[in-house]
Image (cartoon, rainbow, N blue to C red):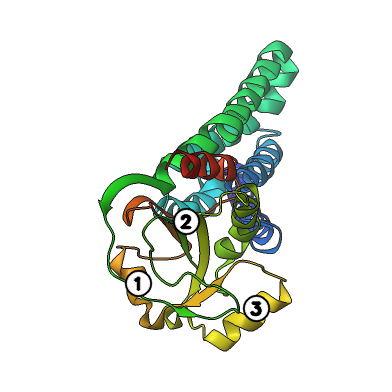
Amino acid sequence: MDEKPKSAWKVRLSAVGLAVLALIVVYGVAVLVSNDVRLIYWDGAVVLFCAAIWLGRTKEDWFAAVLLVFPLFASFAYLVLANIPVLWPNLILWAVAVAIGLVFVRTLRTRRDLATGLAVMLLIGSVWYCVWYVPEELARSFNRVRDASAPTFDLQPVSGGGVPVSSKRGEILVVDFFSTTCAPCIAELPELAAVRADLSNNHDIEFVLVASDKGDDTPERFRAFAERRHLTLPLAFDPGGKAHDSFGFRGVPALAVLDRTGRVRLTRQGYNAAETSFRRDLVQFLKTL
C-alpha cells in the first residue's frame, strides 16, 4: 500500500479529532464562562491556529484544513450568524488563522520574516474585530431608534412598592422583557441596574423588569429568582406574553423605551457582553428624551 495516501488520511483523521476538540473548547467556554462573542472568537482562533500548526508541521494538506474548520464554522453560522449576521468577519478571520497556521512552520524555516508578518497580520485583524468592529456592529444590530405609537399593555406587579405597570404621561418608562432561564437576560441585569443607578436623580424615569409564562416563568418563580440575586429593579409579570408580543418582539431579552408622551422611542432585542457601550449609550439616549 502507498504510504503517502495512508499518511494523508491519518492527518485528515487527526484534523477531524482536532475539529471536535475545538468545538468542545469554544462552546464549553461559551456555556460555562461567558457567551461574549469576542471570547468565542479568541478561543476559536487560538485553538484553530495551534491545531493547524500541528497539522502542517510536515506538509500542507488543505483538505485537512477544511475538515478542521468545518464543524466550528457550521455551528457558529447556525447558532450565532443566524441571529447576528453582522458577525460574518468571525468566519473569515478563523479561516485566515487556519491558513496561516498550516503554512507557519514551513514558512518559519525558510522565510522567518514572512512567517512573522503573517502572524502580525492575524493579530492586527483580530484586535480590529474584537475592539472596534464587534462592539459597534452589535449596538447597531440590537438597537432600533424609533418614534411610533406604543401598544396598549397592562402588566401585573410582582415586587412590592411602586411598580410601573403601564406608561404614564410625563414619565419615561424602560420596559425590559426577561426570562429567568435566559443566559443573555441574566448577563444583561448588572448593566441595566447600573443604568438605573446612573439615572437615580432623574425621578421621571422608571424601569420595570418583566417576565412571562411564555418563558416558563411564574410570578412566584420570578420573585424567588429576584430575591436570590438581590435585585432591586421593579418586577412585573406579562401573562401570555401579550405585552411582549404587542411590541413586535420575538425573543428575550427585549427592551422598549417609552417617552413622556407614551411613544416608543427605542426598541432593542438581544444582549451580549461584547456590546461594551450598552450602559453608556442607553444612559445618553434616556437623557435626550
* Label pair 3/2, CB-CB below 8 angstroms: no
The image quarter containing residue 247 is: bottom left
Q: Residue at 50% of width from left, 76% of height from top?
A: 236
Whole-percent x, y for residue 137 in the image: 46, 38
Q: Residue at 61% of width from left, 65% of height from top?
A: 186
Whole-percent x, y for residue 144 in the image: 36, 46
Residue on which disc 1 sits: 243
Label placed on residue 270: 2
Whole-percent x, y for residue 80 in the image: 47, 53
Labels 3, 1: front one? 1
Give the amino acid at mark 1: Ala
Q: Earlier in the sequence, mark 3 or mark 2?
A: 3
Q: Secondary structure at mark 3?
A: helix
Q: Between marks 1 and 2, how big is the CA–CA gap?
A: 17 Å
Q: Between marks 3 and 1, how big is the CA–CA gap?
A: 21 Å
Residue on which disc 3 sits: 225
**In this rendering, does residue 150 appear at all?**
yes
Give the amino acid at mark 3: Phe
Whole-percent x, y for residue 159 in the image: 59, 78
